[in-house]
Amino acid sequence: MRFVLALFKHETNTFSTQPTELQSFSRGSVREGPCHGVEAVRASQGTNNAVAAYLDLAKELNAEVDFAIYANAVPSGIVTRAAFEAIVAPIVASAAKGCDAILLDLHGAMVAEGYLDAEGELLRRLRAVQSDTPIVAALDFHANLSAEFIRHADVVTGYCTYPHVDVYQTGERAARTLRAMLDKRAEPVLLWRRLPMLTQILNQSPSRQPMKDIMDKACAAESSGRVLNASVFAGFPLADTPYTGLSIVLVADKNKQADAVELLDELADMAWRRRADFITEYDPFEKTLARAALLPDGPVLLVDHGDNCASGGTTDEMSVLREMMALGMTDAVAGPYWDPASVEALISAGMGAQCTIDLGGKTDMPAVNLRGKPLRVTGTVVNITDGRYTVTGPMFTGMRLSLGRTAVLDTGGILILVSEKPQEPFDAGIFTHAGILPETKKFILIKSKQHFLAGFGSLAKHIVMVAGPGVCGSDFSQFNYTNLERPMFPLDAELGGIALMGPGPRRP
């Protein structure tokens, strides 16, 4: 038995001006850029990744494994055509040699030059060389799914948590269904529906309403055996594609298809009736910070969610830190800020040196009419690191990450972490590797949306969501969508009912 494995992940913010090139696909890798074969196994084994569950299944079945590629990039702008082709080529080539199953660890919201539906294009090419081989895909909770993708897949599972702490389990769920398929104990049929609604990322978490009951019902249906797999995808609203929106995918056994259709209707109706609950208006960040400054005790977690690199932001927009300094908020740590030039300046100055830098603000964001504005800061260089650490928290546990070279500047009231690579702070190691204990500070300023809860939620006495500027904002009206299917809630006038955007079975 031969399995082809691949990890190819990118969440594409089409409003970002930062292109995603081949070398960007090095997140968790053992080298700069993607890795293959034995190196890909080494990067994945024992980690909280879906592909790690695939490796465990292969071991259990004594199957030969061709790990075609491990390519994982931090969310950013559109993937270059060259990068897409370079990563897809070895996956398709491996599948073309013949295999018993193709197991994919994907995101589901990737856009590449020439391909608004990048993962759908990958599956189309795989199906062209393997017409009947099972194709299994584990996807991120924020996937945007197309009919093309569903048509060519046999098994689809999605994360049930946000922050994503069940990534390995998502792979296990897919692997379990694949094994039943290989053993002739199940004949999977995919049922899918996409709703004409955008949901704000801050309101998507299945740990609370309005998503909680929807996800709970889906998980209960899978646990009880009503369906083989049930996944609710909140969608990634910062991708301007015809496939963007909340969707539901059920993997049903062929002889239980009618009941699965009823479940699909139930889940879709729940989501549609709650559409308004997924939308919230946020105060200007200046007003929010002024209130936070008056809080008597800490740690106070200040979460700047408009420039979050896990949603495609650059993490070099300085407005929130600038306002924090203007308000005199001290006893704080802030970062990481992506600014390779400032890192170089701080390292050149050396440990213990007094240094003045123009921090961040190197990126213009025309999609939201925002020009980069650096923040001049002066302080002492108190640490320099290689930026490498291993995740110990519950999200992507065991993954080896690198910020590139990093430096810590102490301004006297705020410790500022500056890095060569962007990274969302979902694990405390982002600070502790540089000798910073965030829990000892009154204020912790980070750029995130929800993933921060995995590594920092338990540290905070107060969590304050700060709507700073950037291409990750929650006000969808500020974005010029040109490819999005319309009408779409909440951008358009109230829609009359649920729009069915999903096919039935993939193949007769």
Image (spheres, helix red, strand yellow):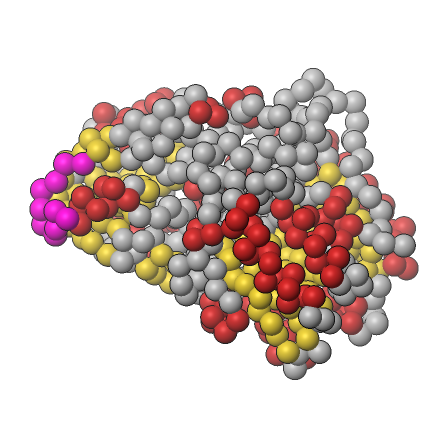
Quarter placement of the N terminus: bottom right
Q: Is residue 73 visible?
A: yes
Residue 77 x/y as whole percent? 49, 39
Residue 475 lies in the magenta-colored region: no
Q: Is residue 103 left or right of residue 34?
A: right
Residue in the foreground of this view, choosing between 472 and 147 = 147
Q: Please report the residue visible at 52 percent of the width from the left and 40 percent of the height from the top.
A: 78
Residue in the foreground of this view, choosing between 126 and 57 = 126
Quarter placement of the C terminus: bottom right
Residue at the far bottom: name it.
Answer: 62
Q: Please report the residue visible at 68 percent of the width from the left and 48 percent of the height from the top.
A: 120
Location of residue 312 with respect to 470 vertically, above or below: below
Q: Is residue 205 visible?
A: no
Q: Please report the residue visible at 61 percent of the width from the left and 74 percent of the height from the top.
A: 65
Residue 94 x/y as whole percent? 64, 67
Q: Which residues are magenta?
A: 348-357
Residue 291 x/y as whole percent? 34, 26
Q: Please report the residue visible at 56 percent of the width from the left and 50 percent of the height from the top.
A: 84
Residue 71 x/y as whole percent? 51, 57
